[in-house]
Image (cartoon, rainbow, N blue to C red):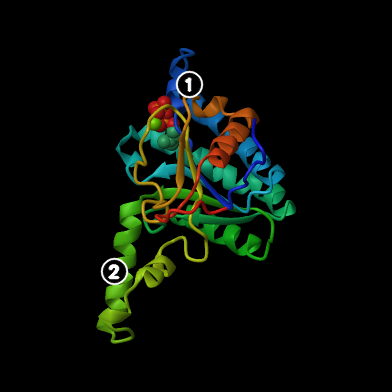
């Protein structure tokens, strides 16, 4: 049916549905988050196996602070453990890790771990794994605007120097190409403030599967859907 699978350079994934997965089994939501981390580990393997260059996962949005404190703390503990304990293995697999998001609000210990992980893997040339953590797309743009405004007020640049390119270089995703494909599990069909600037031309794939159930078949299915779409970037000729 499919002539050739197109491999996107950059895939973004919104890992949604952990809570519902647990609730459907009569378990606490936190069990769903624990399973979700397992699915994330597997996702990294699929990405490596299929030759993806950049993978960005949405793990905690700046809006998720609205959840009960106990759930927020649990998610933080899990992600901290993920970054700490999976690091050696990811590093050995030549994975470069970047954390996208507002770090200032995080506790100092966690900030140190993040800095260390990024430093340690910065010369790796395999998969680029970006973990969006305490991330919000609009906040990211607002923070870029502040940085640029400061540069203008210091007379380092002129207002006329502000263009899309400069904004892009000022976002957390500096040096990371725009996502070609965004996958969201959990059945909701929304962007929810994920990579809002960067995903202007991304293909969107929404899956009904709850995140902990996401498997390699779903991953390949997403690549197939991506391959079947014609990307024109506003033009009329298909771009291949
Ligand atoms: C996604 O699963 C994980 C995070 C946002 C941290 P949810 O926790 O949103 O699960 P549902 O959507 O309530 O099922
Ligand atoms: Mg959700």
First-in-chain label (1 vs 2): 1
- Residue at the far right: name it: 92
Q: State whether label 1 is within 8 Å of ligand 1.
A: yes
In this view of the protein, can residue 38 be seen by the observer? no
At label 2, counting other C-alpha atoms closer than 10 Å, the crowd grade (few under 14, some 14-19, many 20 or more) is few
- Front in this rendered view, residue 75 or 210: 210
- Residue 21 badge: 1
At label 1, counting other C-alpha atoms closer than 10 Å, the crowd grade (few under 14, some 14-19, many 20 or more) is many
- Residue 223 badge: none
Q: Quadrant of ligand 2?
A: top left
**Circle 1 SS class:** helix
Residue positioned 63% across, 42% down in the render: 44
Determine the CA span between mark 1 and mark 2: 40 Å
Q: Picture quarter containing residue 16?
A: top left
Pointer 2: what residue?
146
- Percent position of residue 18, x then y: 47, 27
Q: State whether label 2 is within 8 Å of ligand 1.
A: no
Residue positioned 65% across, 53% down in the render: 127
- Percent position of residue 1, x then y: 64, 30
- Front in this rendered view, residue 143 or 6: 6
């Amino acid at each position: 049916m499919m002539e050739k699978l197109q491999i996107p350079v950059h895939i973004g994934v919104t890992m949604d549905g952990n809570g519902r997965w647990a609730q459907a089994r009569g378990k606490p939501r936190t069990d769903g988050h624990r399973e979700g981390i397992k699915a994330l580990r597997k996702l990294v393997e699929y990405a490596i196996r299929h030759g993806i260059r950049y993978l960005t996962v949405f793990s905690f949005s700046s809006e998720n602070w609205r959840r009960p404190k106990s759930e927020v703390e649990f998610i933080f503990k899990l992600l901290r453990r993920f970054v700490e304990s999976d690091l050696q293995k990811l590093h050995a697999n030549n994975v470069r890790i970047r954390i996208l998001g507002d770090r200032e609000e995080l506790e100092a210990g966690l900030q140190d771990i993040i800095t260390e992980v990024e430093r340690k893997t910065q010369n790796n040339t395999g998969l680029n794994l970006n973990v969006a953590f305490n991330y919000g797309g609009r906040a990211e743009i607002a923070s870029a605007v502040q940085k640029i405004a400061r540069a203008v007020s210091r007379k380092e640049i002129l207002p006329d120097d502000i263009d899309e390119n400069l904004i892009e270089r000022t976002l957390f995703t500096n040096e990371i190409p725009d996502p070609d494909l965004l996958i969201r599990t959990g059945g909701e069909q929304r962007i929810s403030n994920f990579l809002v600037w960067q995903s202007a031309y991304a293909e969107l794939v929404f899956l009904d599967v709850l995140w902990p159930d996401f498997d390699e078949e779903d991953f390949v299915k997403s690549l197939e859907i991506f391959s079947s779409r014609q990307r024109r970037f506003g033009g009329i000729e298909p771009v291949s």
